[in-house]
Amino acid sequence: MWEKLIAFILVLLVIGSVAPVHAAEQKASTWQDEIIYFVMIDRFNNGDTANDYQVDSSDPSAYHGGDFQGIMEKLDYIKEMGFTAIWLTPIVNNEAKGYHGYWTEDFYEVEEHFGTLDEFKLLVQEAHNRDIKIILDLVVNHTGYEHPWLSDPDKHDWFHEDKPILNSNDQNLIETGRLAGLPDLAQENPEVREYLLDMAKWWIEETDIDGYRLDTVKHVPKDFWEDFSKEVKAVKEDFFLIGEVWHNDPTYVADYAKTGIDSFVDYPFYNEATRIFSSPDQAIGKYMNGIWQRNAVLYENPSILGNFIDNHDNKRFTRLAIEKDQDPVSRLKQALTYLYTAPGIPIVYYGTEIAMDGGEDPDNRRMMEFQDHELVSYISELGKIRQEYPALSRGDYELLLDQAGMTVFKRSDAEQSMLVAINNTTADQTVTMTNDMIEANQQLRAVLGEGIISGNSDGYVIRTSSESAEIFVIEDEEAQLMGMTSWVVGTGGLVIILGIVFLIVKRKKVKP
Ligand SMILES: [Ca+2]
Ligand SMILES: [Ca+2]
């Protein structure tokens, strides 16, 4: 009986110590907490040479051999870098040379270079087993150049007439013209619309993917996207839609949020971030703060936008830095720090973690080389920090200090406040955060970087070396003290309970 009592007390103790952690884990899963790794399937990892049909790694426009099996083998690598979701380029069957996936030949078949439908399902399952979500790239604007429907007399009205998009301000032409000469689907035709909606729903039901990255959104009419969002989101709870509206005007991009698309790859963010961080001494604060302020007005939830510094359609960030005679690794560290601490979902393009070089498409799609690299560690560290401190993914953004090449901003939610200091200059900097920026009686504990900064009568003095960044959690000294007290009390309580158990057992033993 005593053994049972002891076991019961021990169970209570275990439950008591585990419960708070469990509660923290149960926070509502929303997409703003994700960190996305973007993979071009053909260029990532060749896990199965049996599907290497006409592979030529010396030709940048040919298949290089990457496939589902290769991604599966690297899921742990992706997970360890702190990513929680993977965006994959389209997997549908493409016509010859469609290594990138954007030249559809059959909307319902899997590209044979990548593997089979069953292999893809397994990839999704293996990702889910690791708490990684899968976002699939989907193209509904156009087909490949030689799609069989083009020669099918019954499908004549499935395409718009062949005309190029010569005027980039003519929205009707943007929607009905041929992008890069690609056959443009007529979504206003009810048969086409139904086909595309059924297809989009089928992939979710069949493979259990978690989201779509929608290609060429601005080339398809908004009323199609309204139907699309409604129908597709009804298939799976919390299904995520992130659209590509490639435009520099934030109001133009934001107008598509009315269609029900949750998020967009933020090109206005990309333009400013790459310009500012690809060389030192550029002003940061006012420009990046401007992006945030505009987004905060334009979007219901600006923290769900997708931020990036690299993608498959633009020169790699490394190339931008090289063109300015800069060291790409230190430039990337600055840019990545901002990417991971600013409001918005960080999206990292494969290869950025090894500072992969690359000019315009297709040079920006070189085959991945897996290697130890300081940026792999740096990204892992940033990922850990972003996951550990939700204020970075959910909190407000407040610019505190903005001087030539140096910025300090605060990210706060109801639970915590973080301070990010980015020294984008080639000199060491010392800045003081006055008590109207950060209240007195607090301390800054570095989570990227080292040490604790206590305040003095002037405020908090932050010293940063040239081209470096630090992230702090702002802690209330009083709260710290209370935390210590509750720990002491908690530990004391445990000692007392164990003492009682000990006495009871002892008493039982001495009984005749
Ligand atoms: Ca292969
Ligand atoms: Ca179109």
Image (cartoon, helix red, strand yellow):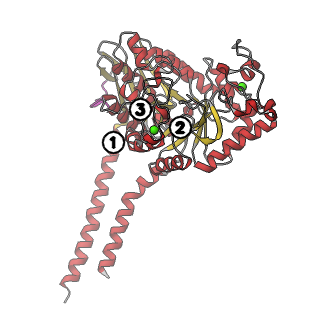
- Is residue 299 at least partly visible in the picture? yes
Work out how far the residue at label 3 is from the one at label 1, CA to CA, in angstroms. Answer: 15 Å
Please identify, in this view, whether the residue under mark 2 or under mark 1 is nearer the observer.
Answer: 2
**Residue type indicated by callout 3:** Met
Q: Which residue is mark 3?
A: 418
Report the Cα–Cα distance between label 2 and label 1. 29 Å
Per the image, label 2 sits on a secondary structure element best described as helix
Q: Answer left or right for 67 relative to 200.
A: left
In the rendered image, residue 192, in percent from the top left (x then y), is placed at 76, 36
Which residues, given as a range, are shown in magenta? Answer: 444-456
Number of dots carrying numbers: 3
Identity, as a three-letter code, of the amino acid under mark 1: Gln
Residue 451: x %, y % from top left = 27, 31
Query: Taking the image as drawn, is residue 437 in sight?
Result: no
Looking at the picture, how far across and down is residue 365, in whole percent? 47, 25
- Mark earlier in primary sequence (2, 1): 2
Question: Is 452 one of the magenta-colored residues?
Answer: yes
Per the image, the residue denoted by label 1 is 480
Q: Earlier in the sequence, mark 3 or mark 1?
A: 3
| Tag 2 residue | 32
